[in-house]
Image: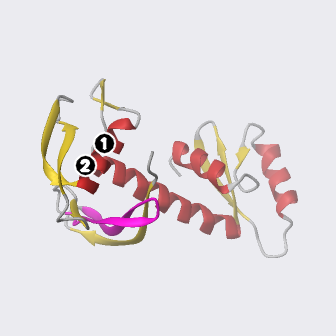
Amino acid sequence: MSQYTISKLKTFDGMQGQGFSLALLRDGKTVAEVINNARGGAFIFRWVDIEARATVKTVDYKDEPCEFGGTVEEAMFHAYALTLPKHKHFDRLSFLTPDMVVEQMVDALQCERRLKRAFKTKIVFIEKGIPYSYPVRAGQNLDVVMAAVKKHYPDAVMLNPLPVEEALALAIQAGF
């Protein structure tokens, strides 16, 4: 299965929240430019293989099969979205849309950036599903401060010593 990632993420404030533009990559190669113009509509996908026509097989808002004309890369991304775990929407499970898949990637990248920034000056931990951070002043020993925090929060899971991927998964789950 192909691996999708994003790069060149640029965010901006729009009329209805934060917008972004980014490059969508499949196996490290750019396949589309994606724009959320923060005006309340669907994301704009500009596929790089505009000349390579294909039938895109996907599902509609009722999760019923549908198809339309698109590009080969577009068809592959829709197929990839259908392989991902469904999400709960109004008491029923639904397939993820391509917009939702990209939004999850953006959220994960932004969370990773926040986490790495916080690790420079803070201890980040999760207790009972809630993320917390505690400042570490210059010259303080990180292990000593973590031990002191652990005394007050014995059930805390410290994220700083974990591998970034593991810490990121826990941070996303806790809404960091």
Alpha carbons under labels 1 and 2: distance apart: 6 Å
Above or below for 56 versus 20: above
Q: Is residue 74 left or right of residue 111?
A: left
Q: Which residue is mark 1?
A: 79
Above or below for 6 versus 58: below
Q: Position of residue 64 (x, y in %)?
A: 17, 28
Task: Find out whether residue 29 is within the magenta segment.
Answer: yes
Q: Is residue 16 left or right of residue 79?
A: left
Which residues are the magenta region?
17-38
Report the front residue among 81 and 123. Answer: 81
Which residue is at a point 52% across and 48% down the rendered structure image?
172
Q: Quadrant of residue 1?
A: top left
Q: Position of residue 45 (x, y in %)?
A: 23, 61
Which residue is at a point 54% across and 44% down the rendered structure image?
174
Give the overall secondary structure of the magenta segment.
Answer: strand
Q: Position of residue 96 (x, y in %)?
A: 31, 40
Report the front residue among 73 and 78. Answer: 73
Q: Callout 1 environment at 10 Å: few (<14), some (14 to 19), or many (20+)? A: some
Q: Is residue 108 left or right of residue 126?
A: left
